[in-house]
Amino acid sequence: MAVHPPKTAIELLHIPHEVRALLTALHLQKPDMTLLKSLSDDEWHSLLAFCDISHLTLPLALLPGNDFPHWVVKRLDTNLADNALRFESVKAIYREVADALAKAGVDHIVIKGFTQAPEYVAKPGFRAQSDIDIFCPRESIEAARTALQAIGYISDDKTTMSADHVSALVRLGSWQWRGNRFDPEMPLGIELHFCLWNEDVSLIRIPQVTRFWERRIMREVDGLSFPCLNPVDHLGHLALHILRNLFLHDWVVHHVRELAVFLHSHANNDAFWQSWSDTHSPSLRSFEVIAFYHAREWFGCQLHPQVEREIASLTAARQSWLRRFSGSALEVMFQENKDSLWLHLSLLSSCREKWKILRQALVPSRVLSFGSPSVRIRNKRLAPSSGNHPWREYIAYLLSRLAAHGRANLIAITRGLRWYLSLHHPFRPAAAIAEVRAADR
Protein backbone atom coordinates (compact mmCIF):
# COMPACT_ATOMS: atom_id res chain seq x y z
CA MET A 1 0.00 0.00 0.00
CA ALA A 2 1.35 3.40 -0.99
CA VAL A 3 2.18 5.72 1.87
CA HIS A 4 1.11 9.32 1.25
CA PRO A 5 2.78 12.20 3.07
CA PRO A 6 0.56 13.98 5.61
CA LYS A 7 -1.38 16.91 4.21
CA THR A 8 -0.17 20.38 5.08
CA ALA A 9 -2.35 22.90 6.93
CA ILE A 10 -3.08 24.70 3.65
CA GLU A 11 -4.09 21.48 1.87
CA LEU A 12 -6.70 20.75 4.55
CA LEU A 13 -8.49 24.06 4.09
CA HIS A 14 -11.72 24.55 2.17
CA ILE A 15 -10.42 27.16 -0.27
CA PRO A 16 -10.31 27.26 -4.09
CA HIS A 17 -7.52 25.39 -5.84
CA GLU A 18 -6.05 28.56 -7.37
CA VAL A 19 -5.86 30.30 -3.98
CA ARG A 20 -4.16 27.27 -2.49
CA ALA A 21 -1.69 27.45 -5.38
CA LEU A 22 -0.90 31.09 -4.55
CA LEU A 23 -0.43 30.46 -0.84
CA THR A 24 1.90 27.57 -1.62
CA ALA A 25 3.95 29.80 -3.91
CA LEU A 26 4.13 32.52 -1.24
CA HIS A 27 5.46 30.08 1.38
CA LEU A 28 8.63 31.60 2.81
CA GLN A 29 10.68 28.52 3.67
CA LYS A 30 9.54 26.10 0.96
CA PRO A 31 7.88 28.06 -1.85
CA ASP A 32 6.41 25.81 -4.53
CA MET A 33 5.33 27.30 -7.87
CA THR A 34 4.15 23.99 -9.35
CA LEU A 35 0.41 24.46 -8.79
CA LEU A 36 0.50 28.12 -9.82
CA LYS A 37 2.18 27.32 -13.13
CA SER A 38 -0.44 24.70 -13.97
CA LEU A 39 -3.50 26.97 -13.62
CA SER A 40 -5.92 27.26 -16.52
CA ASP A 41 -6.93 30.65 -17.91
CA ASP A 42 -10.24 30.47 -16.06
CA GLU A 43 -8.42 29.77 -12.80
CA TRP A 44 -6.08 32.68 -13.47
CA HIS A 45 -9.04 35.01 -13.99
CA SER A 46 -10.52 33.80 -10.73
CA LEU A 47 -7.22 34.17 -8.89
CA LEU A 48 -6.56 37.68 -10.16
CA ALA A 49 -10.04 38.79 -9.12
CA PHE A 50 -9.41 37.34 -5.66
CA CYS A 51 -5.97 38.96 -5.40
CA ASP A 52 -7.37 42.38 -6.26
CA ILE A 53 -9.85 42.14 -3.39
CA SER A 54 -7.42 40.57 -0.90
CA HIS A 55 -4.47 42.92 -1.69
CA LEU A 56 -2.28 40.07 -2.90
CA THR A 57 -1.93 41.18 -6.52
CA LEU A 58 1.44 42.83 -6.00
CA PRO A 59 2.95 39.95 -3.95
CA LEU A 60 1.84 37.71 -6.83
CA ALA A 61 3.42 40.09 -9.35
CA LEU A 62 6.77 39.83 -7.53
CA LEU A 63 6.92 36.05 -7.91
CA PRO A 64 9.05 34.68 -10.80
CA GLY A 65 6.46 34.52 -13.57
CA ASN A 66 8.45 33.07 -16.46
CA ASP A 67 5.92 30.26 -16.87
CA PHE A 68 2.79 32.34 -16.34
CA PRO A 69 0.55 33.03 -19.35
CA HIS A 70 1.69 36.09 -21.30
CA TRP A 71 -1.52 38.00 -20.61
CA VAL A 72 -1.10 37.41 -16.86
CA VAL A 73 2.49 38.70 -16.89
CA LYS A 74 1.42 41.77 -18.86
CA ARG A 75 -1.43 42.48 -16.46
CA LEU A 76 0.78 42.12 -13.36
CA ASP A 77 3.56 44.26 -14.85
CA THR A 78 0.99 46.98 -15.54
CA ASN A 79 -0.26 46.78 -11.97
CA LEU A 80 3.28 47.20 -10.62
CA ALA A 81 3.98 50.15 -12.90
CA ASP A 82 0.69 51.86 -12.02
CA ASN A 83 1.22 51.37 -8.31
CA ALA A 84 4.72 52.85 -8.49
CA LEU A 85 3.22 55.98 -10.04
CA ARG A 86 0.45 55.93 -7.48
CA PHE A 87 2.95 56.04 -4.63
CA GLU A 88 4.35 59.27 -6.05
CA SER A 89 0.84 60.69 -5.63
CA VAL A 90 0.66 59.25 -2.11
CA LYS A 91 3.85 61.07 -1.18
CA ALA A 92 2.60 64.40 -2.53
CA ILE A 93 -0.74 64.08 -0.75
CA TYR A 94 0.84 63.05 2.55
CA ARG A 95 3.20 66.05 2.48
CA GLU A 96 0.20 68.34 1.96
CA VAL A 97 -1.72 66.66 4.79
CA ALA A 98 1.25 66.77 7.16
CA ASP A 99 1.76 70.45 6.42
CA ALA A 100 -1.92 71.22 7.17
CA LEU A 101 -1.75 69.32 10.46
CA ALA A 102 1.49 71.02 11.47
CA LYS A 103 0.01 74.48 10.82
CA ALA A 104 -2.95 73.51 13.00
CA GLY A 105 -0.60 72.38 15.77
CA VAL A 106 -1.79 68.76 15.57
CA ASP A 107 0.75 66.03 16.32
CA HIS A 108 0.22 62.74 14.48
CA ILE A 109 1.77 59.48 13.39
CA VAL A 110 1.25 57.51 10.19
CA ILE A 111 0.16 53.89 10.58
CA LYS A 112 -0.04 51.07 8.02
CA GLY A 113 0.39 51.99 4.35
CA PHE A 114 3.87 53.05 3.30
CA THR A 115 5.16 52.67 6.88
CA GLN A 116 5.33 48.91 6.14
CA ALA A 117 8.39 49.48 3.95
CA PRO A 118 11.05 48.19 3.99
CA GLU A 119 10.64 45.69 6.86
CA TYR A 120 7.28 44.16 5.91
CA VAL A 121 7.34 44.88 2.17
CA ALA A 122 10.52 45.68 0.27
CA LYS A 123 9.31 48.95 -1.31
CA PRO A 124 6.25 51.15 -0.70
CA GLY A 125 5.45 50.85 -4.40
CA PHE A 126 5.01 47.11 -3.87
CA ARG A 127 2.04 47.69 -1.55
CA ALA A 128 -1.46 48.75 -2.60
CA GLN A 129 -2.71 51.84 -0.75
CA SER A 130 -6.19 53.33 -1.08
CA ASP A 131 -5.98 55.77 1.83
CA ILE A 132 -3.56 57.32 4.31
CA ASP A 133 -4.07 56.27 7.92
CA ILE A 134 -3.28 58.94 10.49
CA PHE A 135 -3.42 58.51 14.27
CA CYS A 136 -3.96 61.49 16.55
CA PRO A 137 -4.76 61.54 20.25
CA ARG A 138 -8.52 61.55 20.71
CA GLU A 139 -8.54 65.16 21.92
CA SER A 140 -6.88 66.29 18.67
CA ILE A 141 -9.21 64.56 16.24
CA GLU A 142 -11.58 67.50 15.71
CA ALA A 143 -8.70 69.92 15.13
CA ALA A 144 -7.19 67.49 12.63
CA ARG A 145 -10.49 67.08 10.79
CA THR A 146 -10.98 70.86 10.65
CA ALA A 147 -7.47 71.33 9.26
CA LEU A 148 -8.09 68.80 6.49
CA GLN A 149 -11.51 70.20 5.66
CA ALA A 150 -9.80 73.56 5.18
CA ILE A 151 -7.75 72.07 2.30
CA GLY A 152 -10.76 70.53 0.56
CA TYR A 153 -11.55 67.23 2.30
CA ILE A 154 -15.08 66.24 3.27
CA SER A 155 -16.47 63.31 5.31
CA ASP A 156 -17.95 60.42 3.35
CA ASP A 157 -20.16 59.29 6.30
CA LYS A 158 -19.72 55.57 5.61
CA THR A 159 -17.84 54.61 8.76
CA THR A 160 -19.10 51.53 10.61
CA MET A 161 -19.62 51.31 14.35
CA SER A 162 -16.63 48.98 14.70
CA ALA A 163 -14.19 51.39 13.02
CA ASP A 164 -11.21 52.80 14.89
CA HIS A 165 -11.43 56.06 12.99
CA VAL A 166 -13.90 58.84 12.28
CA SER A 167 -15.63 59.06 8.91
CA ALA A 168 -13.01 58.92 6.16
CA LEU A 169 -12.14 62.22 4.50
CA VAL A 170 -12.13 62.45 0.71
CA ARG A 171 -11.78 65.08 -1.98
CA LEU A 172 -14.51 65.13 -4.57
CA GLY A 173 -13.37 65.36 -8.15
CA SER A 174 -14.10 64.27 -11.69
CA TRP A 175 -12.27 60.93 -11.42
CA GLN A 176 -14.32 57.89 -12.41
CA TRP A 177 -13.81 54.21 -11.67
CA ARG A 178 -12.47 52.36 -14.72
CA GLY A 179 -11.79 48.97 -13.16
CA ASN A 180 -8.13 49.62 -12.28
CA ARG A 181 -7.47 49.24 -8.56
CA PHE A 182 -3.99 50.67 -9.05
CA ASP A 183 -5.02 53.73 -11.05
CA PRO A 184 -2.42 56.45 -10.29
CA GLU A 185 -5.15 59.09 -10.53
CA MET A 186 -7.58 57.41 -8.12
CA PRO A 187 -8.22 59.78 -5.16
CA LEU A 188 -6.78 58.88 -1.78
CA GLY A 189 -8.88 59.00 1.36
CA ILE A 190 -7.61 60.13 4.75
CA GLU A 191 -8.61 58.14 7.83
CA LEU A 192 -8.15 59.81 11.20
CA HIS A 193 -7.74 57.11 13.85
CA PHE A 194 -8.56 57.90 17.47
CA CYS A 195 -7.20 54.66 18.96
CA LEU A 196 -4.58 52.01 18.27
CA TRP A 197 -6.67 49.32 19.99
CA ASN A 198 -10.45 49.68 20.33
CA GLU A 199 -11.42 48.45 23.79
CA ASP A 200 -15.02 49.60 23.31
CA VAL A 201 -15.50 47.15 20.44
CA SER A 202 -13.39 44.19 21.57
CA LEU A 203 -14.09 44.59 25.33
CA ILE A 204 -10.48 43.49 25.83
CA ARG A 205 -8.35 45.96 27.75
CA ILE A 206 -4.72 46.29 26.71
CA PRO A 207 -3.53 49.40 28.57
CA GLN A 208 0.08 49.03 27.38
CA VAL A 209 -1.00 50.20 23.90
CA THR A 210 -1.30 53.77 25.20
CA ARG A 211 2.49 53.79 25.56
CA PHE A 212 2.92 53.34 21.80
CA TRP A 213 2.23 57.03 21.20
CA GLU A 214 4.84 58.08 23.77
CA ARG A 215 7.55 56.05 22.01
CA ARG A 216 6.88 57.39 18.49
CA ILE A 217 9.84 58.14 16.21
CA MET A 218 10.64 59.84 12.89
CA ARG A 219 11.50 57.74 9.84
CA GLU A 220 12.22 58.27 6.17
CA VAL A 221 11.14 56.06 3.27
CA ASP A 222 11.92 56.88 -0.36
CA GLY A 223 12.62 60.52 0.49
CA LEU A 224 9.43 60.86 2.54
CA SER A 225 9.88 61.82 6.20
CA PHE A 226 7.09 61.01 8.67
CA PRO A 227 6.40 60.27 12.35
CA CYS A 228 5.42 56.68 13.12
CA LEU A 229 5.54 53.92 15.72
CA ASN A 230 8.92 52.61 16.80
CA PRO A 231 9.85 49.18 15.36
CA VAL A 232 8.73 47.11 18.36
CA ASP A 233 5.41 48.93 18.71
CA HIS A 234 4.89 48.84 14.94
CA LEU A 235 5.05 45.05 15.12
CA GLY A 236 2.69 45.03 18.09
CA HIS A 237 0.17 47.28 16.37
CA LEU A 238 0.13 45.11 13.24
CA ALA A 239 -0.38 41.96 15.33
CA LEU A 240 -3.22 43.58 17.27
CA HIS A 241 -4.77 44.85 14.03
CA ILE A 242 -4.82 41.26 12.75
CA LEU A 243 -6.40 40.10 16.01
CA ARG A 244 -9.03 42.83 15.78
CA ASN A 245 -9.94 41.78 12.25
CA LEU A 246 -10.11 38.13 13.26
CA PHE A 247 -12.80 39.10 15.77
CA LEU A 248 -14.67 41.02 13.05
CA HIS A 249 -14.39 38.10 10.55
CA ASP A 250 -12.62 40.47 8.18
CA TRP A 251 -9.98 39.51 5.61
CA VAL A 252 -6.47 39.54 7.08
CA VAL A 253 -4.44 37.52 4.58
CA HIS A 254 -2.33 40.44 3.26
CA HIS A 255 -1.60 41.69 6.79
CA VAL A 256 -0.56 38.19 7.85
CA ARG A 257 1.64 37.88 4.75
CA GLU A 258 3.46 41.12 5.62
CA LEU A 259 3.80 40.01 9.24
CA ALA A 260 5.26 36.68 8.07
CA VAL A 261 7.86 38.50 5.95
CA PHE A 262 9.00 40.49 8.99
CA LEU A 263 9.08 37.50 11.33
CA HIS A 264 11.03 35.43 8.79
CA SER A 265 13.64 38.11 8.12
CA HIS A 266 14.08 38.76 11.86
CA ALA A 267 14.13 35.13 12.99
CA ASN A 268 17.81 35.43 13.98
CA ASN A 269 17.74 39.01 15.28
CA ASP A 270 18.37 38.43 18.99
CA ALA A 271 18.66 42.15 19.77
CA PHE A 272 15.23 42.95 18.34
CA TRP A 273 13.45 40.18 20.21
CA GLN A 274 15.19 41.08 23.44
CA SER A 275 13.91 44.64 22.97
CA TRP A 276 10.44 43.28 22.22
CA SER A 277 10.49 41.19 25.39
CA ASP A 278 11.77 44.12 27.48
CA THR A 279 9.30 46.65 26.03
CA HIS A 280 6.07 44.67 25.80
CA SER A 281 4.51 43.04 28.84
CA PRO A 282 3.84 39.28 28.97
CA SER A 283 0.11 40.03 28.64
CA LEU A 284 0.60 42.12 25.49
CA ARG A 285 2.97 39.54 23.98
CA SER A 286 0.38 36.81 24.56
CA PHE A 287 -2.03 38.69 22.28
CA GLU A 288 0.59 39.41 19.64
CA VAL A 289 1.74 35.81 19.22
CA ILE A 290 -1.77 34.78 18.18
CA ALA A 291 -1.10 36.68 14.96
CA PHE A 292 2.46 35.29 14.80
CA TYR A 293 1.08 31.75 14.91
CA HIS A 294 -1.19 32.51 11.92
CA ALA A 295 1.81 33.86 9.99
CA ARG A 296 3.76 30.64 10.54
CA GLU A 297 0.82 28.39 9.65
CA TRP A 298 -0.16 30.25 6.49
CA PHE A 299 3.19 31.30 5.06
CA GLY A 300 5.75 29.04 6.72
CA CYS A 301 7.87 31.79 8.22
CA GLN A 302 10.70 30.98 10.57
CA LEU A 303 10.24 32.22 14.14
CA HIS A 304 12.79 33.39 16.68
CA PRO A 305 13.13 31.06 19.70
CA GLN A 306 11.72 33.79 21.95
CA VAL A 307 8.54 33.83 19.86
CA GLU A 308 8.35 30.04 19.95
CA ARG A 309 8.58 30.17 23.75
CA GLU A 310 5.82 32.78 23.93
CA ILE A 311 3.54 30.60 21.81
CA ALA A 312 4.32 27.58 23.98
CA SER A 313 3.42 29.58 27.10
CA LEU A 314 -0.10 30.43 25.87
CA THR A 315 -2.97 28.97 27.87
CA ALA A 316 -4.21 25.53 26.89
CA ALA A 317 -7.43 27.05 25.53
CA ARG A 318 -5.63 29.48 23.22
CA GLN A 319 -3.21 26.84 21.96
CA SER A 320 -6.08 24.46 21.33
CA TRP A 321 -8.02 27.13 19.41
CA LEU A 322 -4.98 27.93 17.26
CA ARG A 323 -4.34 24.28 16.40
CA ARG A 324 -7.97 23.75 15.46
CA PHE A 325 -9.05 27.06 13.90
CA SER A 326 -6.00 28.95 12.62
CA GLY A 327 -7.13 28.31 9.03
CA SER A 328 -10.65 29.65 9.57
CA ALA A 329 -9.70 33.22 8.65
CA LEU A 330 -8.62 31.94 5.22
CA GLU A 331 -11.80 29.95 4.73
CA VAL A 332 -13.98 32.90 5.77
CA MET A 333 -13.02 34.63 2.52
CA PHE A 334 -15.12 32.05 0.67
CA GLN A 335 -17.63 30.73 3.19
CA GLU A 336 -18.81 32.64 6.25
CA ASN A 337 -17.73 31.20 9.58
CA LYS A 338 -17.60 32.51 13.14
CA ASP A 339 -14.82 30.36 14.58
CA SER A 340 -12.99 33.43 15.93
CA LEU A 341 -15.89 33.91 18.35
CA TRP A 342 -14.51 31.18 20.59
CA LEU A 343 -11.07 32.76 20.68
CA HIS A 344 -12.64 36.10 21.53
CA LEU A 345 -14.67 34.59 24.37
CA SER A 346 -11.61 32.81 25.75
CA LEU A 347 -9.87 36.19 26.09
CA LEU A 348 -12.66 37.69 28.21
CA SER A 349 -13.10 37.15 31.94
CA SER A 350 -16.46 38.82 32.59
CA CYS A 351 -19.60 36.73 31.97
CA ARG A 352 -21.46 39.89 31.08
CA GLU A 353 -18.90 40.80 28.41
CA LYS A 354 -18.88 37.26 27.06
CA TRP A 355 -22.65 37.32 26.71
CA LYS A 356 -22.50 40.67 24.91
CA ILE A 357 -19.92 39.40 22.38
CA LEU A 358 -21.86 36.13 21.92
CA ARG A 359 -25.08 38.01 21.22
CA GLN A 360 -23.38 40.38 18.78
CA ALA A 361 -21.83 37.45 16.91
CA LEU A 362 -24.96 35.33 16.63
CA VAL A 363 -27.56 38.08 16.10
CA PRO A 364 -26.87 40.63 13.32
CA SER A 365 -26.69 44.11 14.81
CA ARG A 366 -28.02 45.82 11.70
CA VAL A 367 -29.52 45.08 8.30
CA LEU A 368 -28.77 47.13 5.22
CA SER A 369 -31.59 49.41 4.21
CA PHE A 370 -33.46 49.15 0.92
CA GLY A 371 -31.55 50.88 -1.85
CA SER A 372 -28.14 50.51 -0.25
CA PRO A 373 -25.46 49.74 -2.90
CA SER A 374 -24.00 47.17 -0.52
CA VAL A 375 -27.07 44.96 -0.86
CA ARG A 376 -25.45 43.36 -3.91
CA ILE A 377 -22.13 42.78 -2.13
CA ARG A 378 -21.50 39.19 -1.11
CA ASN A 379 -18.33 38.69 0.91
CA LYS A 380 -16.62 41.67 -0.76
CA ARG A 381 -17.73 40.53 -4.21
CA LEU A 382 -20.35 42.23 -6.37
CA ALA A 383 -23.17 39.82 -7.13
CA PRO A 384 -24.69 40.10 -10.63
CA SER A 385 -28.08 41.76 -10.84
CA SER A 386 -30.96 39.35 -11.22
CA GLY A 387 -32.92 41.85 -13.27
CA ASN A 388 -35.82 41.63 -10.83
CA HIS A 389 -37.66 44.55 -9.28
CA PRO A 390 -35.47 46.29 -6.64
CA TRP A 391 -37.80 45.15 -3.84
CA ARG A 392 -37.53 41.55 -4.98
CA GLU A 393 -33.75 41.83 -5.03
CA TYR A 394 -33.84 43.33 -1.54
CA ILE A 395 -36.05 40.52 -0.20
CA ALA A 396 -33.72 37.99 -1.81
CA TYR A 397 -30.81 39.71 -0.06
CA LEU A 398 -32.59 39.51 3.31
CA LEU A 399 -33.36 35.83 2.84
CA SER A 400 -29.79 35.06 1.76
CA ARG A 401 -28.36 36.87 4.78
CA LEU A 402 -30.77 35.06 7.10
CA ALA A 403 -29.76 31.71 5.62
CA ALA A 404 -26.04 32.55 5.74
CA HIS A 405 -26.22 33.67 9.37
CA GLY A 406 -28.26 30.64 10.35
CA ARG A 407 -25.82 28.25 8.72
CA ALA A 408 -22.80 30.04 10.18
CA ASN A 409 -24.36 30.07 13.64
CA LEU A 410 -25.13 26.36 13.51
CA ILE A 411 -21.58 25.52 12.40
CA ALA A 412 -20.09 27.90 14.98
CA ILE A 413 -22.03 26.34 17.83
CA THR A 414 -21.19 22.81 16.68
CA ARG A 415 -17.49 23.53 16.29
CA GLY A 416 -17.43 25.49 19.53
CA LEU A 417 -18.93 22.60 21.48
CA ARG A 418 -16.44 20.15 19.98
CA TRP A 419 -13.61 22.48 20.88
CA TYR A 420 -14.93 22.95 24.42
CA LEU A 421 -15.30 19.21 24.92
CA SER A 422 -11.78 18.58 23.62
CA LEU A 423 -10.45 20.96 26.28
CA HIS A 424 -12.14 18.97 29.00
CA HIS A 425 -10.90 15.57 27.84
CA PRO A 426 -7.15 15.87 28.50
CA PHE A 427 -6.57 12.13 28.19
CA ARG A 428 -8.35 11.77 24.90
CA PRO A 429 -6.15 9.91 22.37
CA ALA A 430 -4.36 12.21 19.94
CA ALA A 431 -5.73 10.24 16.98
CA ALA A 432 -9.30 10.90 18.15
CA ILE A 433 -8.62 14.62 18.51
CA ALA A 434 -7.15 14.71 14.98
CA GLU A 435 -10.26 12.93 13.71
CA VAL A 436 -12.54 15.57 15.26
CA ARG A 437 -10.40 18.37 13.81
CA ALA A 438 -10.69 16.81 10.35
CA ALA A 439 -14.47 16.50 10.80
CA ASP A 440 -14.66 20.22 11.57
CA ARG A 441 -13.24 20.95 8.15
Image (cartoon, rainbow, N blue to C red):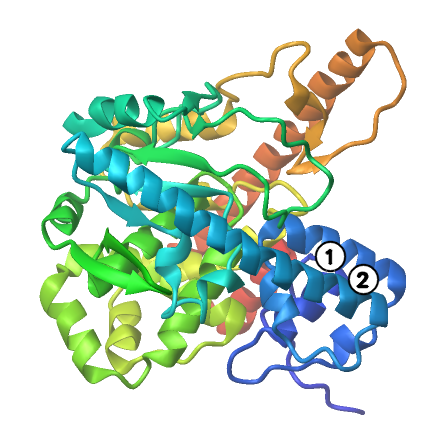
Q: CA distance from mark 2 to mark 1?
A: 6 Å
* Residue drawn where x is 28% and y is 73% of the image: 307
- For the residue marked with disc 2, what is the amino acid? Trp
Location of mark 1 (residue): 48
Location of mark 2 (residue): 44
Instruction: Please state, as top left, top right, bottom left or bottom right, where the C terminus lies in the image.
Output: bottom right
Tell me if 310 is positioned left or right of 115 in this view.
Answer: left
**Alpha-carbon neighbours of circle 2 within 10 Å: few (<14), some, or many (≥20)?**
some
Q: Quadrant of residue 234?
A: bottom left
Indicate the position of residue 166 as horizontal and vertical percent values: 35, 26
Look at the numbered discs 2 and 1 and tell me whether their residues touch, using CB distance below 8 Å: yes
Q: Secondary structure at mark 2?
A: helix
Indicate the position of residue 120 as horizontal and vertical percent values: 40, 67
Q: Secondary structure at mark 1?
A: helix
> Looking at the rendered structure, which numbered label has been put on residue 301?
none
Closer to the camera in the image, 183 or 363 = 183
Q: Is residue 344 visible?
A: no
Indicate the position of residue 437 as horizontal and vertical percent values: 57, 61
- For the residue marked with disc 1, what is the amino acid? Leu
Q: Quadrant of residue 351?
A: top left
Q: Is residue 283 visible?
A: yes
Instruction: Please state, as top left, top right, bottom left or bottom right, where the N terminus lies in the image.
Output: bottom right
Tell me if 109 is positioned left or right of 31 in this view.
Answer: left
* Residue drawn where x is 52% and y is 71% of the image: 299
Task: Count the marks.
Answer: 2
* Residue drawn where x is 44% and y is 46% of the image: 246
**Alpha-carbon neighbours of circle 1 within 10 Å: few (<14), some, or many (≥20)?**
some
Indicate the position of residue 241 as horizontal and vertical percent values: 36, 48
